[in-house]
């Protein structure tokens, strides 16, 4: 479309929160076309693989018009060039976000001076939300209802149920009491039954509380 105003909304979106959905909706009301671009983040310990994040965002935004969802592995300015975006959408939740976003905006402007950055504020109830916080709550079994779209909540719940037996097994192993030492019971000088002499016990690192097992 000639003269089409296209905005790129980039992020890792791991997971996609209701704050992200709110910003996507706001951007859709301002631009002719909004591309939600999911960045590859192999070094950040992703909760969801890239393909699943793209699928969930498409499901969460299907009621919105003129929304596209893609993934990208390279610089965000290169992604913007490929999709024909003139504007990059970034969310500002609080003053603490500004310094990082300011640095990113200046670096992206240096890489491509034709890309403008538009900062949007989410609704008040989402100002405290960020993906890292939601991810930690979900992984530790907390309630994330109302913080993420329904599709993300269901997938996070399924993933938590799948790993819960593993976590419980690890907790049982770590909390198991040490087995009593085998062998003949020694006698102390006073004639009472006891363990190994103190001089031998002190030299063994595994006998100290908190010592790591090999």
Image (cartoon, rainbow, N blue to C red):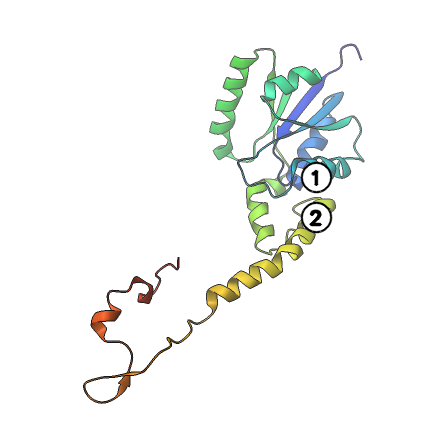
Residue occupying the far front of the picture: 183
Mark 1: secondary structure:
helix
The answer for how far apart the CA atoms under marks 1 and 2 are is 9 Å
Instruction: Indicate left or right for 110 with 146 as reference.
Output: left
Q: Is residue 193 above or below residue 80?
A: below
Q: Residue at x 35, y 78 (%)?
A: 183
Other-residue count near label 2 (Cα within 10 Å), few / some / many at <14 / 14–19 / ≥20: some
Q: Quadrant of the C terminus?
A: bottom left
Camera-nearest residue between 141 and 89:
141
- Is residue 85 visible to the viewer in this orientation of the structure? no
Mark 2: secondary structure:
helix
- Is residue 180 visible to the viewer in this orientation of the structure? yes
Residue 52 at x, y = what percent?
70, 39
Q: Residue at x 69, y 53 (%)?
A: 158
Q: Residue at x 76, y 14 (%)?
A: 4
Q: Quadrant of the N terminus?
A: top right
Instruction: Indicate left or right for 30 with 203 as reference.
Output: right
Residue 63 at x, y = what percent?
81, 35
Residue 80 at x, y = what percent?
65, 18
Location of mark 2 (residue) = 155
Q: Is residue 69 above or below residue 80?
A: below
Give me the disc on residue 52: 1
Quadrant in which residue 77 is drawn: top right
**1 and 2 marks in contact (CB < 8 Å):** yes
- Counting residues from the start of the chain, the first of labels 1 and 2 encountered is 1
């Amino acid at each position: 479309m000639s003269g089409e105003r296209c905005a790129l909304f980039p992020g890792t979106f791991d997971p996609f929160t209701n704050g992200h959905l709110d910003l996507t909706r706001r951007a859709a009301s301002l631009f002719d076309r909004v591309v939600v671009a999911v960045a590859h983040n192999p070094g950040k310990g992703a909760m969801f693989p890239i393909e699943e994040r793209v699928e969930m965002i498409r499901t969460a935004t299907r009621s919105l018009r003129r929304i596209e969802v893609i993934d990208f592995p390279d610089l965000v300015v290169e992604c913007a060039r490929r999709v024909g975006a003139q504007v990059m959408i970034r969310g500002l939740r609080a003053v603490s976000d500004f310094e990082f976003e300011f640095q990113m905006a200046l670096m992206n402007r240096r890489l491509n001076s034709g890309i403008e950055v538009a900062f949007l504020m989410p609704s008040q109830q989402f100002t405290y939300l960020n993906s890292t916080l939601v991810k930690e709550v979900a992984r530790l079994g907390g309630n994330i209802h109302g913080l993420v779209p329904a599709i993300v909540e269901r997938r996070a719940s399924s993933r938590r149920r799948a790993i819960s037996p593993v976590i419980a097994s690890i907790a049982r192993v770590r909390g198991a009491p040490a087995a009593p030492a085998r062998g003949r019971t020694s006698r102390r000088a006073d004639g009472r039954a006891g363990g190994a002499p103190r001089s031998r016990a002190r030299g063994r690192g595994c006998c100290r509380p908190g010592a790591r097992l090999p």
